Image (spheres, rainbow, N blue to C red):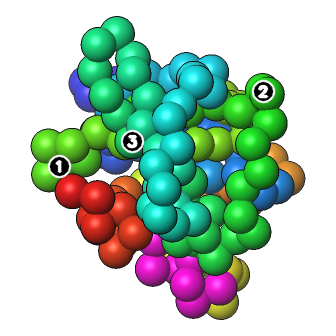
Amino acid sequence: MDFQNSRSTQEVQRLSIFELAGKLFGLDILRSREVIPLPRFTPLPNSGDTFWGVFNLRGEIFPLVDVSSILGLPPKQIQSDDMVILVDSTEGFVIGMLVDKIHSILTYLPAEVKIPRGMVSKTMEFYLSGVLQHKYNLIHILELENLLRAKPILAHY
């Protein structure tokens, strides 16, 4: 007799949930290397709204990136309680993504994800793989490869 759980036909996935400009976003937890409080960073002149500068973490230098403008959100204002998610790209580089707040880890089934057409701006839609309704919140799931290939980020690699 087969006692498999009905969920076993779909692989459960996990998202790191964070807040940016009052919206909730999800990032595949396997692509999130580490979460740290906003470190001291060195601003770089003429680097645009997205690339804020660089910071040193245990002897490694990482770029500090604000993805708000890429997603069509208002520019980020630095707050003392901001967080940084170190995100791995498939291209072999790591960025420090500046966020307002880290919320939780969320487990979900891929079938629960909806295509975001008409739910978000066209600008943001390109950078999302879908949206997920969780309790009373809409979580925007980032299509990380599209985001990391945005011109403002690639211009520095």
The mark found on residue 112 in the picture is none
Q: Residues within 10 Å of mark 1 (few under 14, many from 20)?
A: few
Q: Nearer the viewer, residue 114 or 124?
A: 124
Name the image quarter holding the N terminus. top left
First in sequence: mark 3 or mark 2? 3
- Which residues make up the magenta segment? 121-128
Q: Nearer the viewer, mark 1 or mark 2?
A: 2
**Element class at badge 3:** strand
Q: How far apart are the alpha carbons under marks 3 and 1?
A: 16 Å
Instruction: Give the x, y percent position of residue 10.
Output: 34, 46
Instruction: Give the x, y percent position of residue 85.
Output: 50, 34
Instruction: Give the x, y percent position of residue 127.
Output: 46, 71
| Mark 2, residue position | 81
Residue at the limit of the structure toward the front, as seen here:
45
Q: Nearer the viewer, mark 3 or mark 1?
A: 3
First in sequence: mark 1 or mark 2? 2
Find residue 102 and report its image quarter: top right
Instruction: Give the x, y percent position of residue 16.
Output: 54, 35
| Mark 1, residue position | 90
In the displayed structure, 65 sits above or below 2; it is below
Q: Residues within 10 Å of mark 3 (few under 14, many from 20)?
A: many
How many labels, in total? 3
In the displayed structure, 112 sits above or below 29; it is below
Instruction: Residue at 28% x, 21% y: name it.
Output: 60
Taking the magenta stretch, the answer to whether it contains residue 125 is yes
Amino acid, disc 2: Asp
First in sequence: mark 3 or mark 1? 3
Q: How far apart are the alpha carbons under marks 1 and 2?
A: 29 Å
Amino acid, disc 1: Thr
| Mark 3, residue position | 63
